[in-house]
Amino acid sequence: MTQLDIDALKSTLKDRTPGPFHLSELYGADWDRIYIGDKVKMGHAFLDAVRAGKLPGVIDTGTKKGGGRLYLWKPRGL
């Protein structure tokens, strides 16, 4: 199973323009190569990390749209 790398995602977020996103966009091109069951597990782990405050600036919008749960990247100071 593929593991969710919170540190790698934080690094990707730093270079990202503020705004809405799906986990698949943050994860990158390899997302399409992941088994669906692992995507579900990683999605849940990401949501748990967001809710636990492990990804400061990432907000769970509570909505799903065109590719899964929608998050908002809003870095501090914006």
Image: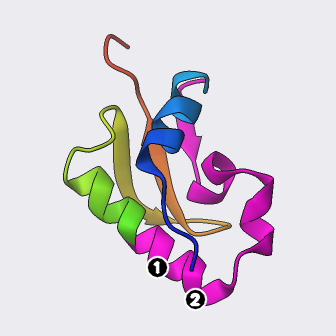
Residue at the image position 57 percent from the left and 56 percent from the top: 23
Q: Residues within 10 Å of mark 1 (few under 14, many from 20)?
A: some
Task: Confirm whether the magenta stretch covers residue 34.
Answer: yes
Amino acid found under the numbered disc labelled 2: Gly
- Mark 2 touching mark 1, by CB under 8 A? yes
Q: Position of residue 46 (x, y in %)?
A: 40, 60
Question: Pointer 1: what residue?
Answer: 41
**Up-down relation of residue 61 to residue 67 (above or below):** above
What residue range appears in magenta? Answer: 17-44
Task: Confirm whether the magenta stretch covers residue 2.
Answer: no
Question: Pointer 2: what residue?
Answer: 37
**Up-down relation of residue 37 to residue 20 (above or below):** below
Residue at the image position 53 percent from the left and 41 percent from the top: 8
Q: Main secondary structure of the magenta part?
A: helix
Amino acid found under the numbered disc labelled 1: Lys
Residue at the image position 50 percent from the left and 67 percent from the top: 3
Q: Residue furthest bottom?
A: 37
**Considering depth in this image, is 8 or 39 the residue closer to the camera?**
8
Quadrant of the snapshot with the N terminus: bottom right
Q: Position of residue 5 (x, y in %)?
A: 48, 53
